Image (cartoon, rainbow, N blue to C red):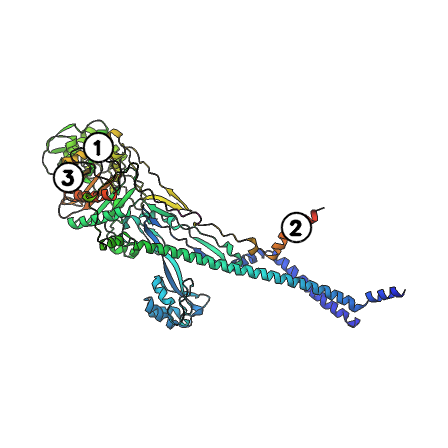
Amino acid sequence: MPREHFWRYLVMAGAFAIFGALILVKTYAIQSGPQAEVFLRQGELHSREQTEIQPPRGIIYDRNGNILAGNRTVYEIGVDLASVRNPQAIALALSALVGADYNTVLERASIPASPNAVYVVLANYVLPEKVALLKSYDVSEEAESMDSTDCSNDAALTGLLCEPKLVRSYPERDLASNVLGFVNHESLGYFGVEQQYQSLLAGEPEKVWLPISPVRVQERPEVPPGASIVLTIDREIQAMVEDTLDAHLARTGAESGTAVVMDPKTGEILAMASTPRMDLNEFQNYGDIYTNEVPYNRAVSEIYEPGSIFKVITAAAAIDTGEVTPETPFPDPGFYNIGGITIRNWNNRAWGDQTVQGCMQHSLNVCMAWLGDVKLGPTLFYEYVDRFGFGHSTGIDLAGEQLGTVKREGVPGWTYSDLGTNTFGQGIAVTPIQMVMAVSAFINDGQMVMPHIVKSVIQDGSQYNVSPQFAGQPISAETARTMNEMLAQSLEGESSLAMVPGYRLAGKTGTAQIPSPTGYDENQTNTSFIGWGPVENPRFIVFVWLERPATSTWASEVAAPLFADIVERLVVLQAIPPNYNGIGTVSNTGQGGQQ
Amino acid sequence: MRNKSFVQAHSQTPWRRQMQTIGLVVVAIASLALLAILYLNVTARAATMGRQVQRLQNERIRLQQQIESLESQLASLTSNEAMQARAAASGFTPMQPGAITYLTVEGYRGRTSVDLAPRAGTQFMGVIRLPDAYTESLFDWVGELFDQYGFGLLGGY
């Protein structure tokens, strides 16, 4: 190389060196300058894509582990517009195999791809069987594996994507539908357990930025699934109660029915049914089934005037104050004047010399008004009503619980005559679950047990059991035992249709005329019955309510047989051996049994 | 004297000095290329493994969905209504109270609470943690080596 040309190389080297140095300087300036953070953010933005991770919804089991609400796979079918080759073929395949509208699909699949139009949904909630048909659409090729999001291996269907997702499934269809509630396509729970435990069941969906680079795959967060729930409901008992209720609705021509079965020691609801019910897999029919503001679950969401079953509260209050005993005499004249109105018995006749025990046995309104007016007075009576939980939430873990209506002394609109009618369950509105909780005091030495529907929660690999809780003690243990025995004798004394051979039961009928804007209608009644057994060691409380029965207006003729039918099958399902010979003798056969 | 001039002539030969410079540059470039190849190799392997992990993650999600779907399907097949129908078709009838003989077993408390908690090892495992070898860059690796051995060598003796 000639020496005189060496300077050229030096110049070139210098130029490159300066250029390189400038690049370094500029790099440093960018990295440390005011725009550095903006560039970093932009870089970060383009290295990730935002997506929402929806954890699978928790499963709902019955107390024996049978699935009442699970999840099933359905598919969203859409097209990647940039990959679409043959919109007509896609429209034809979807209309033939999935049942989609040909023209709609064709129109959507023909949209030109652009930055604003990348992907279009063509069909949603498609069943796996139909997607399987699509995947094997081209019979000349081997079927596409189900783990691919491509719908088909047919070249004509290129761009058609099948994205799997989970939706709610109810294998038992309408069983316990009033308790479960349902989940819509937006994964929102409505009514019952699904609404009450929405956040627990649904888990916490996370909107996250997922790194595009596979090297950063470990940054993908793991979203834990929603918690699963074990209910106190027993599937077999629930099915039996629903079947029996439906049969009696058909037999009596009643407009609606409600039945609740509860374990009186723990407050666990074993069955809860009301009408109407619906197949939860077709929740979109809700509006057609529940018209005119019909409550979804009457047991917790509908208030009614309970009638004579409320007499157990009046009698318990009177006995608890020590003012009366079951043997306290009451000469029944057939009427009682209170607050300017005259109270009469259900058959308008005088029953003569009675005791408080007889008052319960014959369900005498006059006697109850006397107890309320003379033995209790409004202050004490309403104090007991309050202590039994009427007008308050029971705390049951179901959505939509109503509180009932209790007009107390001193409240505007209350008159002294209300005291008289309230004592036998008219002019006061309660929910069935409030009645069930109130009478649980008679079984638990005066303590009311809080009704609940969730037995345990399964979360993060552990199962957490729900402990029974007491909801106060309205009466003493002695009063509770007295009421228990008195109501058992009442049932036996009346030779009630509620009795079941082999089992000693206690309970009370309730017939209440239904109020209307023009007053009470004698021919429109709410008939209910609440009872429990076996009296010596109660294993169940059963409440039934038939609204506006057509065959008879009396609870003793329509509600009592329904109670008996339920109990007759319940003792078999609960394996409670018969131990009562019907003449006041209980044989010792132990608490449990094996069928 | 003669020997000295030979050494001087050898060391001053321009093409030799150029060759030395070129050699050094080539060695440097080759070293950089080796490093780049190594880096590309490690990065490519990490990306491949990452893709595999992504595919397995998707596979796991798909399998979880499939399991849930199959469980629901099984629950439908064994639903109360289905089992009643199967029992009736098999000639079974509901047990009547009078037809039952009870055998009292002392201490028997009936059915116990169902345990549905997942078995150990089958539940949610938390965040995936890949070994560092799949995530660190070459520079991280060299830095780590330096931390591990470099200071030891420098600080020894």
Question: What residue do we see at 23% from left, 31% from top?
Answer: A481
Name the residue type under label 3.
Ser
Residue A191's spot in the image, x, y percent? 31, 49
In the rendered structure, find residue A483 and report the number of the disc placed on it.
Answer: 1
Closer mark to the observer between disc 3 and disc 2: 2
Q: Quadrant of the C terminus of chain A?
A: top left
Name the residue type under label 2.
Tyr
Residue indicated by mark 3? A496
Label pair 1/2, CB-CB below 8 angstroms: no
Q: Nearer the viewer, residue A505 or A166?
A: A505
Residue B117 inside the magenta-drawn segment: yes
- Up the image or down, A546 lies above or below A438; here it is below
- Mark earlier in primary sequence (1, 3): 1
Gap between marks 3 and 2, in whole Å?
A: 93 Å
Give the image quarter of residue A120.
Answer: bottom left
Same-chain status of marks 1 and 3? yes
The reply, left or right, for residue A192 in relation to residue A9 is left
- Up the image or down, A231 lies above or below A339; here it is below
Q: Main secondary structure of the magenta part?
A: loop
Residue A86's spot in the image, x, y percent? 40, 73
In the rendered structure, find residue A269 and report the number of the disc placed on it.
Answer: none
Residue indicated by mark 2? B149
Closer mark to the observer between disc 1 and disc 2: 2
Chain to which mark 2 belongs:
B
Q: Which residues are magenta?
A: B114-121
